[in-house]
Amino acid sequence: MSSAPIPVPVLRRYLVPFDPRRIPHLFTDILILGSGIAGTRAALAVDPALQTIIVTKDQLQQSNSTYAQGGIAGVLDPLDDFASHVADTIAAGKGMCHGDIVEKVIHDAPERISELVALGAEFDRIDGRLALTLEGGHSYPRVAHALGDATGQELMRAMHASVQCAPNVDVWQQTYTIDLLTRDGVCRGALVWNPDHGRTFVWAKQTILCTGGAGAIYRETTNPSIATADGHALAFRAGCEVRDMEFMQFHPTVLYIAGSSRHLITEAVRGEGAHLIDSTGHRFMPDYDDAAELAPRDVVSQAITRQMELTSHPCVYLDLSPIPEDRIRLRFPHIGKVCADFGLDITRDKVPVRPGAHYMIGGVTTASNGQTSLPNLWAAGEVTSTGLHGANRLASNSLLEGVVFGLDCGRNASQAATAIPDNFTAPAMTSAPGVDTADESLDLADIRNSLKSLMWRSVGITRNEESLILAEQQLDFWANYVCRRDLMEPEGWELQNMMLVGRVMATAAQQRRESRGVHARSDYPKTDPDAIQHIRLMRA
């Protein structure tokens, strides 16, 4: 199912110069990069006898996981069955799912969700039983949710409370991971930075990468601004294989208010019965798919984009009038509050929406046990390509993937770390030289905005050969003077990471000369039955 790896040029191995004799060194058993659902679940699964450090670049609570609205999918109703959830996942993935991974994750789901309850997560219930809802692409209501439409917030509250009580776990907040440290082709830990202590070498017996997504690469996104693809970039620079980087999932319904930040409108709104209408009032989804508003996200996103073009209007609208008013207020309190801030009453007003970058399906290639292609490095969550999602992620399978593989990585890394003696020493590291110390300052915010607009135009919902080549050329031009410089703060490192990952995504999208799942090409509009293979990329 895989082609040979495609080489992509990387201008430098490490983003910053360093002299190992002038930087503090710290040793730990397990180093976890990221504090979302995958990283936190990994920490909770680590052997309590092993010292563990979680590094997160913002506050502990800041992650895509916290902002997840819809819920977590699993076979939790006796009338539901595993075969149905498996079939729905594979159907959404458009031929690219790994059957063994899908079976594993779906069969693990009930136990993993029960563990979340045991950790203190309070899911919504009806008469004492979990309240389950239907979402697009699912054939049965199997999505458990919390606080109506704030599931991620509640899950992370419970998990963070548990991890902060774990005596073997230290959490380093507002600490930026600059690069993985490697020696002799093996991951040895990471180079991190925070404003109080500067740079630190953190040497680890095993490292787990859980840095999340890449939505902030795009102008329109549901992701917080911290989702800058740092993990994808630092793993790629360290020599990890990545795959399926052309598959960025766009969520169909993002609140569109000109001049405001974008807010996700959960899939569950359509699952409860809301309709999508265009600026003329026409309910258009039945024109595109028999499942109408409950079609998979790729179908709905592409239909909305087409309808916006047909009507020459910047958005479409969600009409919640088919849902009883009391049901709307019960299920969607967060969305109701956000919309009210803009003078919209979701029980009466049409809600303006358009698609936005939502979930990075592609990522660091992992084996079924969570291992990457770099020894001593494990990975879980949105930074990975596990084979679960294929070419289009089924709604509410992402939190599930995070807890399943987070737990596996925590356990497996623990076993590997236990086999390494405690008296391990730091490998000899040569200095990383500086690259360019030009005096001319750069307007990093301006370049970042230009990059996000370029990715939206050229590597967005619909692509073609010409736009992808232009994107590669423009990214190379920017990188030639941005990525060659020694930038000394997170704003600069994020921009350099975004440029590298944007280049990788454009290359992968150019190589897939067909339309499949979330990857739509206007010059190759059909799905090629002979193109069911991964597009793998590695550092040149």
Image (cartoon, rainbow, N blue to C red):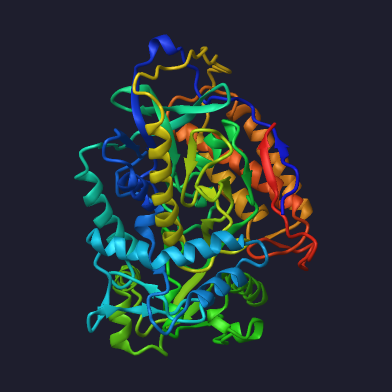
- Left/right placement of residue 160 relative to residue 359 reads left
Residue that extends furthest to the front in the rendered view of this protein: 419
Q: Quadrant of residue 202?
A: top left
Whether residue 255 is visible to the viewer of this picture, yes or no, is no
Answer above or below: position of 375 versus 328: above
119 w.r.t. 474: above or below: below
Quadrant of the frame with the C terminus: top right
Q: Quadrant of the N terminus?
A: bottom right
Q: Position of residue 335 (x, y in %)?
A: 34, 71
Residue 388 image position (x, y, % from top left):
55, 60
Q: Measured from the top left, where is residue 12 in percent x and y?
A: 60, 25
Q: Residue at x 64, y 52 (%)?
A: 244
- Quick one: 457 or 82, which is closer to the camera? 82
Q: Residue lying farthest top?
A: 21
Q: Residue visible at 26% across and 78% down? A: 125
Q: Is residue 216 left or right of residue 263?
A: right
Left or right: where does residue 395 sit relative to residue 504? left
Residue 339, placed above or below residue 158: below
Residue 413, by quadrant, is: top left
Q: Is residue 78 visible?
A: yes
